[in-house]
Each structure stands twice: as C-alpha cells, then as structure tokens.
Image (cartoon, grey):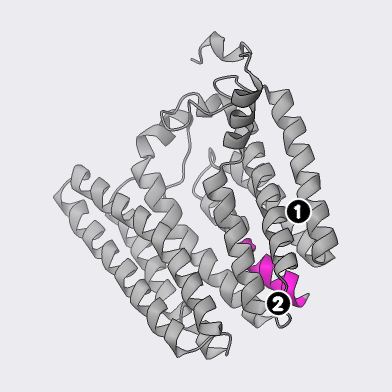
Amino acid sequence: MIDSTLHTHVSLGIKDRTRAYIELLKLRLSFLVAFSSGFGYALGASNFSWATLGWLFLGGLMVSGASVTINQILEKEYDALMKRTKKRPLPTNRISVKEAKIFTFVIGIAGLGILALATNWLTVALSLLSLVLYGFVYTPLKRVGPIAVFVGAIPGALPPLLGWVAATGRIDVAALVIFGIQFIWQFPHFWAIAWVADEDYKKAGFKLLPGGGKRDLNTAFQIMIYTLVLVPLGVLPAQFGITGLYSAFVVTLCGALFFSQTFFLMKQCLSGESSAYKAARSIMFGSFLYLPIVQIAFLLDKV
C-alpha cells in the first residue's frame, strides 16, 4: 500500500524547485541520448556545422527529458515502492503531476521546435516517434512482460540514427548499421540492469527479464547471445566504408571483452545467486563503458 502522504504537495523554494525539475530530466540518461545523436550527426555530416550540432544536442536533450518525465508521471506510484526511485521528485511530491505534465509539454514542444528549425522534418518525426514509444508504449509494457525490452530498445537506439538523418536528410544502410549496433546493445544493457534491480522491480510489478523472468542460466545465456552479436556488428561500419580499420579493431576488442563478461555470469549462475549478482553488475557497468568507447572510436577514425 502506498502511504497517503504521497498525495500531499511539498512546498519548495526556487532553488530546491529548480533542482527538482532538473532531477526530472534524468540528466545522465538524457545527456547520453544527446551525445549519441551528436555522434550520429558527426559521423554522417559531409558539411559539419558546430551550430547544427549544438542545436541538435539541445533539442535531443529536451525531447529525451520530456520522454523520461512522461515515464515518471505514469510510474509515480510504482516509483514510490522501489528503493532506487522512491526519492524522485514525483513520489516525494516536490513536484505535482500537473506541474510535471506542463513541464513535459513545454520542453517537449520546445525540443521538437528546435530540431525543426535546426535540422529537418524527418529528424523531427523520428524524435516524436521515439518520445511516443518510450513514454506511452514502453512504459506501460514494463508491467506486462519482457516484450517491453524489445520496444524500449527502439527509442533507445534511435538517437544515432536521428543524428545521421539530421546530417544527411535520409535513412540509408549506414544509418541502419549504427542503429543496429545500439539496438542490439540495449538487450544485455537492459537485462543486466533488470538482473541487478530485480527485487526492486518485483515490488512495482515490472517484468523485464527474458524467458521465465528469472535470474537464471537461461537469462544469462540470452545476455551472452546478444552480446556476441555485437562483435560482428561492430565491424560493419568499416565494411560499408563509414569508418576504417582502426575503429574496427577497437570495437572488436571492446566487443570481445564485453562478451567475455557473459561467460563469468554463466559460470556464477552455477555457483550461487550472490555471485551471479556481482557478475550481472559487472556486465551492467561494462555496457555503460562499451557504447561511448565504441562511438568515440568511430568518430576518431573518421577524423
């Protein structure tokens, strides 16, 4: 049962209220989204513009912030049940749902408007699609089953494609390649987080682990398979002439190291739950490192 105090609005000063709104944006996640969009733009641009990159970054940050705020509005009561989320602005009533809705509308429209002025309408359409999928489809599906991970992986992988489209105005094979790498990366990333946060997720009824939804050998095996697929995918940008051999070597090495972590998880699954938890946590942190290292390697190789 949710405490009735959750429905009592908390009065805040300007400084604390500003901090609460910033918390709603989930800056670390939104920054990663904006960075991935910038990566796609820099990789695809034949006439690079710092101004366009800056506006793309800002617009992407705002649209991402709107998406995650929608997520928090819809999950307010569930967030209150989980240790990792119960101190967020909405469960603590530092910001009301009405205020959060207005905030979402304002930054969402502003972000899409910035993208419309600085890029092209295909970029805007894909950004809107990403917002809708994440906020209104992925979010409710989290309580339905692991299909949520597949749906969530689409908006999660769109940022580099958006950047490419902002630079080129089209979706081509190269765009689909960089989309595919980030799409497949989402699965070990999501599942490692779901493994680590499983007890908290169960309190809210979130069902994100694959198969039977358990922290077991089957889940570890699926994490291994998707991580393995990343290794050949990482070579495709060089194969299609997007980047060169330098990044292919770096990405293959990163993919192999990331893949090796899954063997440790498989082994620890046979040893005990606490050991497997540590291995899943290691994969989670490995996933955080893998993506920016790979994207930076691609960019440096192009330069």
Label 2 amino acid? Phe
| 165 in the magenta segment | yes
- Residue 99's place in the image compared with 137, above or below, is above
In the image: residue 70, left or right of residue 156: right
- Is disc 1 in contact with disc 2, using a CB cutoff of under 8 Å? no
Q: Nearer the viewer, residue 225 or 27?
A: 27
Q: Is residue 154 visible?
A: no
Which dot marks residue 288?
A: none
Q: In front here: 47 or 286?
A: 47
Give the overall secondary structure of the magenta segment: helix
> Could you tell me which residue is drawn at 43 percent across and 56 percent down?
189
Give the residues drawn in magenta, as a range: 157-168
Tell which of 156 and 110 is nearer to you. Answer: 110
SS at badge 2: loop
Provide residue 181's location: percent of width, then percent of height.
Answer: 51, 71
Res 48 label = 2
What amino acid is labelled 1 in the image? Answer: Leu
Across and down, in percent, residue 10 comes to 61, 14
Can residue 225 be spotted in the picture? Answer: yes
Residue highlighted by disc 1 = 128
Q: Residues within 10 Å of mark 2 (few under 14, many from 20)?
A: few
Horizontal arrangement in the rendering, residue 64 relative to residue 207 (left or right): right
State the residue at coordinates (62%, 25%).
Answer: 15
Q: Secondary structure at mark 1?
A: helix
Give the x, y percent position of residue 30.
Answer: 59, 49
The CA distance from mark 1 to mark 2 is: 24 Å
